[in-house]
Image (cartoon, rainbow, N blue to C red):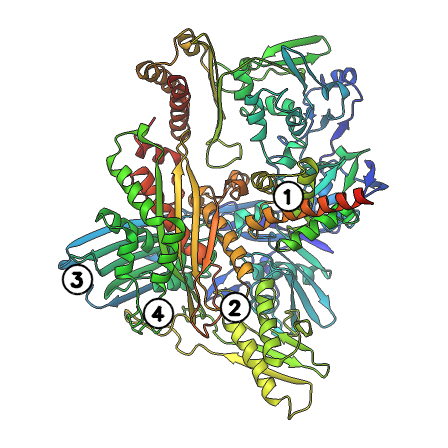
Amino acid sequence: MLYVATVRSPSARGSVRSIRFPALPAGYRSILPADIPGRNAMVSFGAEVPILAQDKVSYVGEPVALIAGPDPALLEELAAATKVVCEEEEPFLNWESFSSDQVAAKRVAVVGDPDLAFSIASNVQGEVYTSGAIEHYYSEPQGAAAAYDYDKIAVWCATQWPYHVRDSVALALGCKADEVSVRPTRLGVHLDGKLWYPSLLACHASIASIACGRPAKVLLTREEDFRYTPKRVRSSVSVRAALGKGGELSALDVRIAVNVGAYGPLADEILSQAVIACTGAYACPNLRVEGYAVVTNTPPGGAFGGLGASHTLFAMEAHANRVAMSAGEDPMDWKARNVLRKGSRLLTGELLKEEVPYDAISARLASASDYRRKYAGYELVRKRRSGRSDGPFRGIGLAFAYQGAGPFLSGEASNTYTVEATLDKDLRVRIFTSAAGGAGAVMDIWRRSASGILGVGLESVSIAPPETDQVPDSGPSTLSRNVSVVNRLVARACEAIQKRRFRDPLPLTARAAYRVPKPIKWEGGQVSGSPFDTAAWAGAVLELELDPWTLEPRTLGVWICVDGGHVVAPDRAAAALRSGVADALGACLNERFDPSGGGAGSLDYFRYGLLPLHELPPINVDFVEPERRAPVKGIGELPFDTVPAAFLSALSQAADAAFSSLPVPSARLIGALGGP
Amino acid sequence: MTISFILNGEDVSANARTVDRLSDLLRDAFGLLGLQSDCRCGRCGRCFVFLDGRLVPSCILPAFSVRGKEIVTIEGFAQTEEYRDVVEGFETAGLETCGFCKGPKILAMADLLERVPRPTPREVLAHMSSVPCRCTDPVALVEAARAIVERRAGRIYRRAGQ
Amino acid sequence: MLVSEIHFPKDLAEALELIRRPGILVFAGGTGILREQGGRGISLPGEVLFVREIPELRRTSLTERFLEIGAAVTLSELLELGDSALPPLLAEAARGIGTPAIRNLATLGGNIAARDRFMDSWPALACLDALVELRDRGGATWMNVNRFMGDDGKPAFPEGGLVTRLRVPIERWDAFLLRKVGPSDYPAPETAVFAFAARAEKGILAEARIAFAGDIALRSRSLESSIIGRGLPLSSREAATIAEGYKSLAAALPEGLALQFGVLVDGALGMLSR
């Protein structure tokens, strides 16, 4: 086995003039772009990312060469001693204002007549909400291994998208796709950080393996992973709301800028998701939304707990709360007035066919958290206080949002997925899907589904390892597809077998394929189609207090109430929601770093950490009763869609200040409270 | 240099360079893959071992620093009754992990209960924060600790009654 | 690849012979040394003095007046001495350092001997007027930890010599406060620790000490002297005047830390005003 170290660009933008390796001992070799047998590009959602940057570099840390050899510690020294000389150019780091050269994607949609609505509005309020970069801190740093296996190249990596790995490696090696066999390793918790980047590392490992004629492994250290792999993109969302006399939302003007980093491999999709979600949970008859995915010379940005909706859901919820508070109204009532209802027209022109469970969720939250009384009480304190001695300062915030599951929205990715099932003579069922590799809880849902339909014991149902030469392409494991789309396909394949099993001999195999019924189309300022197969809804209440000694925020409690449709295993779902809330709280309080200088540094890595468990408040999870025959819905993103906005609003109330991004630096918080 | 120490109850020796971390030595020279050399700054817990009975992150232990010491990894600990207590406690509480942090969480929980036989929920969470992971459910951890304490108490009482 | 020479002295005498070697690195728990080395291999200088096993550095002793702690005693072992032996301010500081696993390696000697910034134990030890024994072949010197703070507030740990023991006075304190501030637990420019201790005798403030440290340390004996001797409780005007004095001291700190320091001073003085 050979290990592979990465030689990286020291410059954010420029041209590579030379790469000078130190003297490499016997058994070590360098690998340059010219050594790539196929194409020097990994394609993701229409964007091309160089496997090794050849002439131009686009971010600090971009791979420009590899060194392969037997000792990983020595390899690290050799890579560090390699001198990469670039002729530097001024990097594009601005993204909240940007040049047209930097636009990787643009989405515009207009509904109704927003200009008219704004001109006659009783009240117009605007604010800009920003969301920062977050590190996934997934279960394992990224890496890949490759080796010849008879007539194929076998590739091992933890990936949400095995077929993307396969196709990327085939392109890089200039071979046929079926000459590559991807064997996914354990994925653990990924938070959408392993969608496309594993494919790049798989290309590195494969190229090294071919060049050296031996198995090769590239394994990033946690620090490398932190500094150079995709983080959650940063966003700036400007929300301007027009309101009628009675506080009804009559129009929204939303401008979105998403910093997608270099190349923008998910730019279109992230932006599309953010734009579709820009009105949040609210009915809005008049809308103008303009969104830009902006490329900068920082490491490529990525998805985090969803593909982009959380940015605008955060902004819309925070703004709704601010509008209500400034009008002296309880946000719970404001939301009740403006929330989507069955029959509301969506951004896509479709009418909402389902009830939105706002009333049920808000009632349960109000009861569990005593929200109404606390909100009123803290408002009274906020309005009457004269100084710091009037503390302790408390606040309570409410947020309501949804999580959509289903297709990609950008039109770039294939939305075709296939699942296969086989019932053999021993009445054992095997399920074949490239999506197997995610959460065990979701695979249990598939097994239960198969077991129920075919009338076999759960122990007789197994899921085949998702090796690409053994399973069909079920698309990437994201957007809750595994629990919605793949789950339905498993059921359909089993139903097809069930129909035939008593007339046709065993073994029987059936395939079920899915195509998006109404793909999203963006044309001339209009968007049409069905963005989601299913949508789960949640409300979150968060109560906090400012520490009397340090004025730092301390969360006192979080209540989250979810309509997740048919929740197959409520205990497991509740556990997943609690850990999701803990992660969302980390993003509100202490998970921060600022890559605006061109990328994350070592100190950013050492500083970064999850919220200690003993600093978590009690987290209360509740589920509303589902509708009859409700489908299984994805709920994992709901904490990120709700908790940050609830936190921001609670903090704004506690400090009597209008905050618009998280975390809030202590200097700002103390300053808002009148200083020491 | 040659480092001699006791590993999972056996006397062993290995060649180590001064640049080598104990975590990498245990994985590479002894094939003990139950720990991972992940963060390399002692904060993630994936490399936990017991050093003379104390829970430590082996990624910030130079290999040379353990000569003459006793090291127990998750593989060695898995042979003990305490391990079974913890695993049963996790199962009783329905504590699920992503798989990567399970071994470290077992060691951390065992270490806690060795030092604090009846920990409060806050003590459990403070101690288990040494294995930060996105998969962690705080309620299940506290429940697991309670279940392990009960299981141990039951065994002690049964033995006393024999 | 640099190969370091590791010395394993079996006793203090042997260590004191070796400490004279230029550039030799003292390695006890190693948590400070390896805290910011995220690469595969460990980077150490040419010579390393491994002191963790030296018996003289591993002892603790308690008298009526002092607690003496060997420099290689780990923070976990320190905490296991228990509340009856350990001054609460020091216990609070030790409990806030790292995780339980890190505390099984980290030593108090290593924590106090950091060169690039003041680590978390310094403010508590400074408030307690702890002493550090530094030894070389020529003999031993006891130094108050407050002397590790330079005139500019930056760390000024004396070069040469080996930290062997710490001596912490055992005194009664009627009020104390220890708080870590900053966005994360990690030692960084935006984090620091605040320590406060006060003692009253017959309604008069007999002692009041405030120390704050991260990259830079703050402690002012003259401000403390101006507080001592006042009747308790302090009036709000007295507290405000004293607080102003402290806030001007904090001008050298980054804005966020200066504000947090000010808030904590207000809180500490508030304890004396009730």
What residue do we see at 65% from left, 26% from top? C107
Q: What residue would you read off at disc 3?
A: A117
Which of the marked residues, 2 or 4, is nearer the chain's N terminus?
4
Q: Tag 1: residue type?
A: Gly
Q: What residue would you read off at disc 4?
A: A355
| Chain of the residue under the numbered disc 2 shown in the image | A
Q: Nearer the viewer, mark 3 or mark 2?
A: 2
| Chain of the residue under the numbered disc 3 shown in the image | A
Left or right, A337 with respect to B56, comes to left
| Chain of the residue under the numbered disc 1 shown in the image | B
Q: Can residue B57 be seen in this view?
A: no
Q: Locate residue B34, reporting x and y percent.
A: 72, 50
Tell me if mark 2 has few (under 14), some (14-19) or many (20+) residues whose alpha carbon lies within 10 angstroms of its own: many
Tell me if mark 4 has few (under 14), some (14-19) or many (20+) residues whose alpha carbon lies within 10 angstroms of its own: few
Which of the marked residues, 3 or 2, is nearer the chain's N terminus?
3
Q: Nearer the viewer, mark 1 or mark 2?
A: 2
Q: Name the one closer to the observer, A44 or A554.
A: A554
Which of the marked residues, 4 or 3, is nearer the chain's N terminus?
3
Q: Locate residue A98, reporting x and y percent.
A: 33, 52
Label disc, if present, on residue A568 of the rendered structure: none
Q: Do the residues labelled 3 and 2 touch (CB within 8 Å)?
A: no
What residue do we see at 23% from left, 56% from top? A241
Q: Is mark 1 on a helix, strand or loop?
A: loop
Left or right, A162 with respect to A381, comes to right
Q: Distance between the residues labelled 2 and 4?
A: 21 Å
Q: Name the one closer to the observer, A277 or A229.
A: A277
Label disc, if present, on residue B45 of the rendered structure: 1
Q: What residue would you read off at disc 2?
A: A483
Tell me if mark 1 has few (under 14), some (14-19) or many (20+) residues whose alpha carbon lies within 10 angstroms of its own: many
Q: Do labels 4 and 3 share a chain?
A: yes
Q: Is mark 4 on a helix, strand or loop?
A: loop
